[in-house]
Each structure stands twice: as C-alpha cells, then as structure tokens.
Amino acid sequence: MLSRALAHVCRLMGVMSFVVAQITAQDQYMTRALNLMSETPLIDGHNDLPWQLRERFNNQLNKVDLNTLNTTHTNIPKIKAGKLGAQFWSAFVPCDTQYKDAVRQTLEQIDVIHRMCQKYPETFRFTASSQEIRAAFRDNRTACLIGVEGGHSLDSSLGTLRAMYLLGVRYLTLTHSCNTPWADNWLVDTESGHSEHNGLSPFGKQVIKEMNRLGMLIDLSHMSVEVMNQVLNMSAAPVIFSHSSAYGICPHKRNVPDNILLKVRDKGGIVMINFYNDYVTCSSTANVSNVADHFDYIKKLAGPSIIGFGGDYDGVKRVPTGLEDVSKMPVLVAELLARGWKDEEVKAALGENLLRVLKKTEEVRDSLAVAPPDDVPIPLEKVQNTCRTSYGYPDSSHPDSSSWGSSLSWLTVLMSLFACLQLREH
C-alpha cells in the first residue's frame, strides 16, 4: 500500500517537474523575445486605427484619448506593451468613394495620422525614411509612417500620387477590393470578380514607374496574381505585401502563392504576415501557433529575408486567440523562438527586412533623381463620367454661363446633374 502511494507521489512530482520546466522554458523564450525587441524595432506593415478614428469619432481627436480608449485593438498602453517600434498606419477609404470624394477622404486620413503623432509626441514620431525609423527607435518613440490602402485614392492622377508622397505617404496599395481604371484587384481571381485590364493598364505601368522615381513602396496586398507578376517583372525597386499570408497554408486569394513568394525573394522584397483568422486558417478561428505556421512556411520556402509582421489590427473582426490586440506581439516572437528561430532570423522579421527594402527603394529613388516627373495623364475615356471635368484634355470644351444654351440643352444639364447625384448616393 505504502509503495503504491509513494509511486503515485513520484508520478505527481514528475508531472509537476515537467510543468515547471515548460513554464520556465516559456519564460526564457519571452525574456529572449523582449530583449530582441529592445534591440530591433518591430515594424508592423498595416494598422487601421485611423479608420476607427473616422468611424467612431469622425476624426475628432479632441473627443478621444488614445491612452484610455479600450474598444480597439490599438491604443497607447497596448502599443507600449507590444513593444511596437514602428507602424505603417493605413490611410484607407472604402471603394465606394471611388469617382466621388476618395481624394478628399484620403487626405483627411493622412491628416488625422499627422495630428495623432502631434497630439502624443511622448509616444509617436512621424517618420518618412529608413534612417528616421532607426532614430525614433533609439529615442524610444514609435515611428509613424503612412500607407495609402487603395489606388482609387489617387483618382487616377500622378499629380495626386506626388502630392501624397510630399505629405509623407511611403507606400501605396495599388488596389483595395475593387478595380481602378488602371489595375485589377484580387477579386479578379475569384468567381465574383472580372478583369478589366489583364493586370495593369498602360497608365498602371506609369504609376509603377513614378512610384519607383519617388521612392514610394509598391504594396501588392489586395492585388490579382497577374498584377503581382507584372509589377515584380517591371519594378526597379523591391516590393512589399503589407498584410498578406501564405497561400500554401491557407488558399485564400488574398494570400501569396508559392511562385510569387519566390519572386519576392529574388526581388529582395518582403511579405508582412496578416493575422486575420480568415487568411491564417481559412476559417473563423485561429491561434498563435497557426500564425507562426505561416512564418515557418515562408522561411522554409523562400528564406527569412522576406518575412515581416502585418497584423491588420483594427481592420479585421477576427484575430487569433493569443494575439487579441497589439500588446500580444511579443507572444508571437516568443513562439518563433520556441520553434528554433535564430536571433538573427527573428531580428530580420521584426524590422531589419523592412528597413532593407525601404533603404533599397530610397536608393532607387536617388538613382532616378535626374528623371523628370511623369506628367502624361490617364486617357480621358478611361475616367470620364458626368461628375468629372476634362480641363486640359485636347478638344474638350467647358461652356461658360453665357453659352450654356447653345452648347447643352437644359434637359441634358438636368440629366447630368441627376446622374451625378445618383453616383454620389452609390
């Protein structure tokens, strides 16, 4: 009887020792993760907090305190706990703004990002270069960068692209979930979409070249595979996927196929892995381990040099268990270390890869410094509608108030106004 009791005690002690060892190992991985994140900035490729500020507060920052806001994935305490070194904030506006007020709304999103940085200077610093990101990190500030999510925000204007660059925009996602007059979006590769341009139109290729000249990162998240291939073939600079995952793990059309991953590697680019459950497991549920599987898959296929973090926080409804908000980033880093990732590989994924891509893009810009801006506009017939004027295009006429009667019937005027109103409503 006594021997049985002793055996039972020994078994319990063995289990307890195993549990303690496991906890100790996890603590060691977390300690190591936090140390690495104090040495290298964690640069996240996509966060939609600015859109939350639009939807919840109409961009009235005086009505919100990011120190106490607790209804979003992102706030200042979560940023600090997550050791977020740099963030590309998304200047996103929905596709239904296309042909209407997309440019104005995008400018307002750019504005709210700048004002957010100005309101919390003890936390944020606006940056626009690889060197400035490193400087902000040294000064214990979260570097703030801007990415415009969707080419519809340009209204098919290279002048608008250049103006946005001057306002600090450092990447453009070529489309969101709608075609533009010059590029096909990812839905083209599904049953619900159709190609309008077989990838990029001639003007779309002008956009790519002008982004190279400016030094603006080309973001291929949300793109059709044909656009991915065309851009990878023609861009002089590396490209990014700001918030996409591995198609080989989850075959969702928003993810990156294997052959494209290899091309990104050869181009020196980066895929910043998305945490949205639907792109992680192709289902409504996911966990930290599932996200780490995407990191492992891409590392095994194309190497650690093309991997980054692209959480998509505050832009999605479902995030993995264990990665509930921005504060949980170290948990994922610890998971990678537990899977045998070397310190240098983790540092690469944290931020060194993105910094390399941005620096190379800046070098391409500098090499093209003598090239003049492209000022050839998109053909009028590609964008013409009743709400768009055509000043500057050849053979376009714009009647003044004294000649309306001779050039347009009142019926035509009323029909045009009605069509414009209908377009704004939809």
Image (cartoon, rainbow, N blue to C red):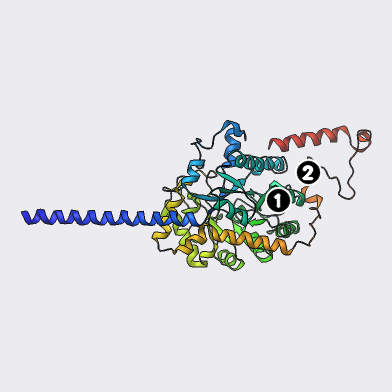
Farthest residue to the left: give it.
1
| Residue 44 visible somewhere in the drawing | no
Q: Could you tell me the amino acid type at mark 2?
A: Asn
Please report the residue visible at 47 percent of the width from the left and 59 percent of the height from the top: 294
Q: In percent of the image, x 49 and y 57: which residue is there?
A: 39
Residue at the image point whose x is 85% and y is 45% from the top: 391
Q: In this view of the protein, which residue sits in the foreground, 358 or 409?
A: 358
Residue 377 percent location from the top left of the image: 80, 53
Between disc 2 and disc 1, whose residue precedes?
Answer: 1
Residue that extends furthest to the top in the rendered view of this protein: 63
- Circle 2: is it few (<14), some (14-19), or many (20+) Cα within 10 Å? some
Query: Which residue does the numbered mark 1 point to in the structure image?
Result: 165
Residue 363 higher or lower than 30, as above or below: below
Query: Which of these two is toward me, 83 or 48?
Result: 83
Q: Quadrant of the C terminus?
A: top right
Q: Amino acid at mark 1?
A: Tyr
**Which residue ends up furthest to the front in the rendered image?**
139
**Farthest-out residue, bottom:** 266
Q: Position of residue 87 (x, y in %)?
A: 57, 49
Q: Is residue 164 visible?
A: yes
Residue 303 at what x, y percent from top left? 51, 67
